[in-house]
Image: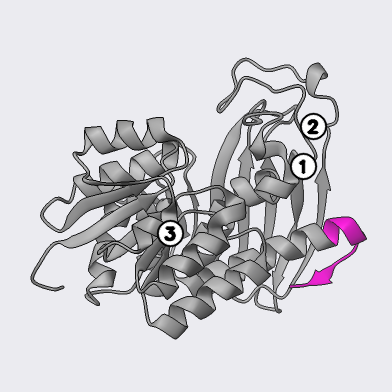
């Protein structure tokens, strides 16, 4: 395997699956895209023709019987556990898109399969590939921020409910709203940057303000739309709360698909020696101090390029045991346990253990 290109496949050829196919094509020296699968024949033909893929399957199980070494799993949320476990049991390395699963129980089954079969499992957490994330993570690990005591994770869309009435807003198919859709990224990157992977309790609340009446919802455009007014819309559109990491640190969060508030997106990392705000479309600024005065540092952020291409590059190297996965199954399981706890807290209207 170390001396040849890995044979890879993509299962699920929607928007994100097509991005994974493109990422593998960008690393043609390391990987050969030899198989694709989707239940929609037109998707198989489009992606298959675009990348000259010889193996084209309607059933992912047939793809897993082929000679692929590794697969990207890019199917709907409800199928993540089934497809990922089947791929791992078939001896394939797996790059699994977010969210890891519908809940922590399903995520644990995926982790167990990867360990049992001794196969690489990497999660699709592309924000880790951003240049500013790599720089800050290294500075925190080197002690330049001191003890991290608080994190803030904010992602608010003024009007950004995706595919209202479709699978995004159907809890049985998606697992939830913005918490599991976009919050999964922000929880992951906050814990990754800080190195805090021990959430112990959470007090949270979720709201369904704009999802209560689909026809009353006003918007300019809709990703994965238009609305399906005969469909289901039973997920939250706003989630907020406070996470405790024992007595060491806390994390506050606001996550919204729709709110009467300005669109904003950022993660704050607050340490005893320095603090920083990332992903707010502004130049990175480290707020710190010298021996005699306050100081703002404007570090030169390394150019990361296409995050999905970088993610695929690390996955291919991890399959060859040249490096660890960019985001591990164990970390994904922590994330899913935290998301489950947020939903439990909101339902119980009290603080709960993670």
In space, the residues marked 1 and 3 are separated at their CA atoms by 31 Å
Looking at the rendered image, the disc whose residue lies closer to the viewer, 1 or 3, is: 3
Q: Nearer the viewer, residue 187 or 146?
A: 187
Task: Specify the farthest residue to the right.
Answer: 349
Quick check: marks 2 and 1 in contact, CB under 8 Å? Answer: yes
Measuring from the top left, give residue 319's x and y in whole percent: 27, 71
Measuring from the top left, give residue 225's x and y in whole percent: 60, 23
Name the residue tied to disc 1: 235
Q: Nearer the viewer, residue 64 or 200?
A: 64
- Part of the protein shown in magenta: 345-354
In the rendered view, would you say 36 is above or below 133?
above
Quick check: marks 2 and 3 in contact, CB under 8 Å? Answer: no
Determine if the magenta segment contains residue 349.
yes
In space, the residues marked 2 and 3 are separated at their CA atoms by 36 Å
Q: Residues within 10 Å of mark 3 (few under 14, many from 20)?
A: some
Q: Which mark is residue 211?
A: 2
Q: Which circle's residue, 1 or 3, is located before the other in the chain?
A: 3
Q: Which mark is residue 151?
A: none
Q: Which circle's residue, 2 or 1, is located before the other in the chain?
A: 2
Please give the name of the residue rendered at 62% of the width and 19% of the height, measured from the top-left corner: 226
| Left or right: residue 19 compared with residue 145 | left
Residue 4 seen by the camera: yes
User: So how many labels did they put on this image?
Assistant: 3
| Left or right: residue 277 compared with residue 152 | left
| Left or right: residue 140 compared with residue 8 | right
Name the residue tied to disc 3: 61
Q: Residues within 10 Å of mark 2 (few under 14, many from 20)?
A: many
Determine if the magenta segment contains residue 10.
no
Measuring from the top left, give residue 265's x and y in whole percent: 56, 40
């Amino acid at each position: 395997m170390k001396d040849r290109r890995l044979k890879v496949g993509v299962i699920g050829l929607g928007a994100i699956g097509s991005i994974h196919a493109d990422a593998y094509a960008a690393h043609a020296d390391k990987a050969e895209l030899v198989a694709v699968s989707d239940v929609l024949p037109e998707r198989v033909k489009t992606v298959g023709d675009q990348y000259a893929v010889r193996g084209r399957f309607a059933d992912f199980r047939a793809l897993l019987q082929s000679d692929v070494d590794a697969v990207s799993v890019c199917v709907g949320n409800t199928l993540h556990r089934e497809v990922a476990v089947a791929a791992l049991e078939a001896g394939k390395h797996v790059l699994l898109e977010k969210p890891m699963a519908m809940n922590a129980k399903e995520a644990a089954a995926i982790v167990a399969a990867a360990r049992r079969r001794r196969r690489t499992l990497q999660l699709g957490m592309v924000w880790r590939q951003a240049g500013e994330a790599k720089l800050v993570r290294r500075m925190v690990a080197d002690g330049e921020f001191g003890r991290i005591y608080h994190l803030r994770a904010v992602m608010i869309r003024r009007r950004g409910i995706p595919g209202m009435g479709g699978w995004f807003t159907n809890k049985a198919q998606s697992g939830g709203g913005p918490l599991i859709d976009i919050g999964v990224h922000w929880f992951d990157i906050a814990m990754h940057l800080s190195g805090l992977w021990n959430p112990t309790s959470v007090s949270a609340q979720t709201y369904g303000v704009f999802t209560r009446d689909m026809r009353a919802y006003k918007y300019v455009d809709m990703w994965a739309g238009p609305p399906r007014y005969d469909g289901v819309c039973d997920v939250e559109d706003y989630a907020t709360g406070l996470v405790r990491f024992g007595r060491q640190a806390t994390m506050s969060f606001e996550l919204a698909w729709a709110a009467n508030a300005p669109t904003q997106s950022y993660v704050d990392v607050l340490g005893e020696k320095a603090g920083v705000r990332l992903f707010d479309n502004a130049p990175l600024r480290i707020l710190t101090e010298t021996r005699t005065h306050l100081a703002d540092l404007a570090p030169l952020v390394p150019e990361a390029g296409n995050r999905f291409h970088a993610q695929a590059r690390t996955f291919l190297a991890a399959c060859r045991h040249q490096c660890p996965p960019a985001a591990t199954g164990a970390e994904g399981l922590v994330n899913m346990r935290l998301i489950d706890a947020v939903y439990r807290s909101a339902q119980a209207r009290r603080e709960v253990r993670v």
